Structure formats: C-alpha cells, structure tokens
Image (spheres, rainbow, N blue to C red):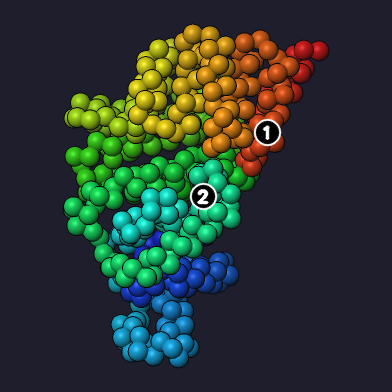
Amino acid sequence: MLPIEHLLRELTPQVLGAVVRRFRDFAAAEDAVQEASLAAALQWPREGVPNNPRAWLTQVAFRRMTDQIRSDSARRVRESELVRDAEPVINPDVDDVAQDDDTLVLLFMCCHPSLTASSAIALTLRAVGGLTTAEIAHAFLVPESTMAQRISRAKQTIKNSGIPFQLPTAAERAERLRAVLHVLYLIFNEGYTSSAGPNLHRADLAQEAIRLTRIVYDLQPDNTEAGGLLALMLLTDARRLARTTADGDLIPLAQQDRTLWDKKQIVEGIDLISATLPKGSVGPYQLQAAVSAVHNEAERVEDTDWPQILALYDVLKRMSENPMVRLNHAVAAAMVHHPEKGLALLDELETDARVANHHRLYAVRAHLLELAGRRDEAVANYRAAAMKTASLPERNYLLRQAARLVDESL
C-alpha cells in the first residue's frame, strides 16, 4: 500500500470531485476535504488505513459539509434540499460513490469556459494536482500573492456560475481540451522536476498526470495533441530512475545510465508519437515528444542526433511563445554549431521578464560558458543559478558544478 501521505494526495481530488458534485459549492467542498484529509493523517497511523480509504474520506467530508449547512441559519432553505441528499451513509468498506472518475469530471469543470485560461489552469493544479499555491506560482513565473488571488477569484466564479458538476458533452470537451492538456502538462512537469523541496521529482504527481492524460486521450483518440502529450510524458518519465543517485543527487541527461531507462515506456511513447505525427496538423506537444524520442533512441549520449533536435526546435519556436522553448533551442544550436551560438541566443532572452531571472537561464548559460572554455563566467552563473532555485537537488548539483570548475582551475 502507498504511504499515507501519497495515498491522501492520490485520493484527495477524487473525493473533492464527489463532494463538489453532491453539494455544488467548490470552496466549501475544498475546506471539507482538507479537514477530512487532516483527520485521516491523524487517525490512520494509529488505527490503520480503512479497507476503502476513498469512501472513508468522502463520508467524513460529507459530514463536514452537512454540519456546516446545518449550522448556517441563512442556508435553511438550502439545508432542506442538500442535507436530504447527503443523509445516506457511505459504508467505508464499500465505495458506493459514483463509479465514474470524479477526478476527470473535476478536471473539465475547472477548465470551464466561464474561467480565463490562466485561472482554469491554476485552479485545476490546486484542486486536481494538489500543488501548493507557491508551486503553481513558480510554474507560471508570477508572485505567490498574485496566484493566490487568481485561485480565489476562480473559486468564486465557479460558485457564482452554477456550473453543473458533470462530464461535458463531446462538443464541450473539444472546447476545453487545450486548457485541460496544458494543466496536465504543468502537473507532470512539477512531478518530474519539483520546483521546491528536498526531492528532485514527485513520482505521484507525474503518474497522476499520465493517468489523467490516458483518460483524456481515450475520450479524444483523434486529437493528435492529446496523443502527443501522452507520448511526451511517457518518453520523459521513462528516464526517471536514472536521474538521481541513491542519495537523491541529480544526474544530468548526458551522464545517465541509459540501461536504467524504462524500455517499455519508451516503446509505447515512440509508437504513440509515430502514430499521431502523420495524422494531420502538428502541435507543440507532438514536437516536444519527438525531441524526447530522439534523445531516448540514442544508445549513447554521443549518438544523439542534435541536428534533428535543432530542426524540431526551429519549428517549435515558430509555433510557441514559451521562453523555455527558446532556452532549449539555444542548447540545441550550441550542440550543432558552437557554444557561442547558443550563448548569443540566450542573450536575446534577457529582456523576457518571464525567464530573465529564472534559474534555468543561468544554469544553461553556465553550461554553455563551460563548453566555450569561459570557466570563470561559468562558475559565476552556476552559483547564481543555485541561489535562484528552491529545489535542493538542483541547488546542490549547480554548486557542485561550480566547485568542480574551481578545483580544476587550481
């Protein structure tokens, strides 16, 4: 069985979906589920995890919601309608909650057209992905206070809109799919490389993103970008076991033991992207998946087809305004041409406020400066990058790189 912390992270969005569907109050439901999760965190270590933990959490959250409704005299009319619906007791050992995956319904609900795209993504990362406000703010490259306000407004919008909690029609799913895919992409990224904390990755988040993306792809099998995103996740996640030492230290791609890569996931990802690319219009997720496939197909780092990767990033850069795409394009250009070419491209990003102060810009510059033989400048940038990341494994790795160059210069 999963550790209790991981189990609660996996079950929380499912329980939240069930509570929102029953009571139709997003903000209050989230509070009730948080209370239920806290009760579980205190009780389960002493008494053991129940046979059906999801039903246990749902029952406790339902009771919290019922108590709240009964204690609010201003909601007496609503109490007569909702408490009656909430009366049936859920047997903690038999999950008679709806069989449909409430997590997926919650995902599409959070991406409702009444919300702005940024609000929909932020709210879903909070409700479905379980990310903290700080983690979401880091993903969006905005201050935490700004993100907190955005999430609060999104909850209020859903409360005021009367959005029905149900799986949208096929036409509605198509309308919301772009935002849904972006949400899943960000959840996966946070799971694969945590923005903060002592661990490089959070496998539970990455696996949940893959699971939900599979469901979305099953619902929209003709959508090439849904297939591309699933392929990208599989191909990227296939390298997870080789990314850290036994002590959790970061191992860069060029130094990884490729025998540890998950060959089954690589085959599935390559088959998937090979099937989606010829189907029609090509989007950013398919191109990123194709880049990952090129990396994964190389048995040794020396075998990497950098000209092909650069060609893919040339197309992707014209298609996307994401500064991280331009950052990766600079790396590919440096590998194909010369490190100075990549450094010149990085200089163009210094005026982009979204990335100008981001640790990845400094880390990439440090790497290219090292390749160009400019060691003193590389040391300064490795150290600057280390001070700008909240991820302990990334910080330690960057500081080790700086120390290595200093030692080699002595």
Whether 253 is drawn above or below 170: the answer is above
Whether 106 is drawn above or below 241: the answer is below
Residue carrying label 1:
386
Q: CA distance from mark 2 to mark 1?
A: 20 Å
Residue carrying label 2:
136
| Amino acid type indicated by mark 2 | Ile
Q: Quadrant of residue 69?
A: bottom left
What is the x, y in percent for residue 308? 37, 15
**Number of residues whose C-alpha sits closer than 10 Å to that of mark 2, classed few (under 14), some (14–19) or many (20 or more):** many
Work out whether residue 326 or residue 35 is closer to the camera in this orientation and state it: 326
Residue furthest to the front = 351
Label 2: state its secondary structure: helix
Q: Is residue 246 visible?
A: no
What is the x, y in percent for residue 377? 70, 18
Q: Quadrant of residue 357?
A: top right
Q: Are marks 2 and 1 in contact (CB under 8 Å)?
A: no
In the visual, does 171 lie left or right of 293?
A: left
Whether 59 is drawn above or below 181: the answer is below
In the visual, does 93 lie left or right of 140?
A: left
Instruction: Identify the residue at horizontal 54%, vertical 37% (top origin).
Output: 354
Dot label at residue 6: none
| Amino acid type indicated by mark 1 | Ala
Instruction: Identify the residue at horizontal 81%, vertical 12% (top origin).
Output: 410
What is the x, y in percent for residue 269? 32, 31
Which one is earlier in the sequence, the residue at label 2 or at label 1? Answer: 2
Q: Quadrant of residue 50?
A: bottom left
In the visual, does 179 lie left or right of 32?
A: left
Instruction: Identify the residue at horizontal 71%, vertical 21% (top origin).
Output: 379
Instruction: Identify the residue at horizontal 76%, vertical 18% (top origin).
Output: 406
